[in-house]
Image (spheres, rainbow, N blue to C red):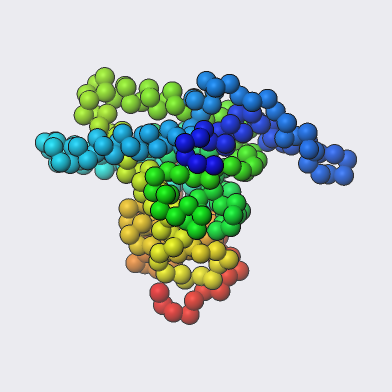
Amino acid sequence: MGGNEVSQLSTDLLAHTDLAVPPRDPAGRVGAHSMRARRPSTLARMMAPSFTQMQILQAISGAVTLGMLVWGNASAWWWLLALVAYFLTGCLGLTVTLHRALTHRAIKLPRPLEVMFTLFGAAGGSGSSVAWAAMHRSHHANVDNENDPHSPEKLGWRLIFSVYDYDFDPRHAKDLLRDKFHMFVHRYYTVLLLAWCFALGAIDIRLCVFVFMVPAFVQITVSNLTSLLTHSQGYRRYETRDHSANNPLIALLGWGEGWHNNHHAAPLRWSFSRRWWEIDPGAVAIAGLIALGLVPREPVVRESAVSARSSSS
């Protein structure tokens, strides 16, 4: 499914909210009738996240960011504010919460932090927590095969422009489908995103540019580069069953997401680094939350049964 179509996942999640606990026949098999549901309305599909939305936002925010770089005369303080906003959306929102806390359950955030950080992640333009977790779990379940929703082997450099194969079983997000808050964010994602944009603009148009547009462009683009480069460019410490690789540049730009081979070797571990020089800002943020007593200290999950390379890399 190409990026010019409404996300199949958004359609399925809206139509199949009963799939959190799919009906089973006496033999314990999932019943075929569990996949039947009425098609959601056009309005409902427009409000839920889709990759058409992401492409539009990436194009508009990219044009705004380029315009500010070339013709703008904003002070360095506005660009520093954009970096802080990207830390909130990309680090605390996407990698700490959407990825490590909600998708893999590597840490447990207190409910107030989970709500706040989820909204940070959603404000970055990468989609709702439900959609993001379902896509990423599908990626791990089908990594680098024909069912991988963002395999660079299938989609190549088109991944940079938010073109995804987004058609998979919504039961990858069955825990989040039970959660009223996460389903609210999913159902009204477009409304929430537009409300955030216009609220910032009503205060000061520069807030809309540097707190929303610039961070959203960076977050969407870096996320797409992560999908592309961490399965094609970099070094491998573990002999995993996929093509995952550690990419230092993506780790720098994406708050630690570039240590992808390490992550695929032990997806339930909240720290993606394995050497002192593999800097993982997301793990540093989690360690800070633990030190402050805001997040319970969880046992470190050991690497999966994969062979580590004998080299010191």
| Percent position of residue 257, x then y | 41, 54
47 relative position to 66: left or right: right
| Percent position of residue 239, x then y | 54, 71
55 relative position to 265: left or right: left
Residue at 49% from the left image edge and 62% from the top image edge: 244
Placement of 249 over or under 2, stated as above or below: below
- Classify residue 193 by image quadrant: top left
Q: Which of 7 and 171 is in front in this view?
A: 7
Residue at 32% from the left image edge and 56% from the top image edge: 252
Q: Nearer the viewer, residue 237 or 304?
A: 237
Residue at 37% from the left image edge and 22% from the top image edge: 195
Query: From the image, which quarter does the C terminus lie in?
Result: bottom left
- Classify residue 246 by image quadrant: bottom left
| Percent position of residue 73, x then y | 11, 36
- Classify residue 66 by image quadrant: top left
163 relative position to 215: left or right: right
Query: From the image, which quarter does the N terminus lie in?
Result: top right
Placement of 206 over or under 83, stated as above or below: above
Placement of 156 over or under 215, stated as above or below: below
Residue 146 visible in the shown view: yes
Total number of numbered discs in the rendering: 0
Residue 293 visible in the shown view: no
List the single residue furthest toward the right: 26
Residue at 41% from the left image edge and 58% from the top image edge: 229
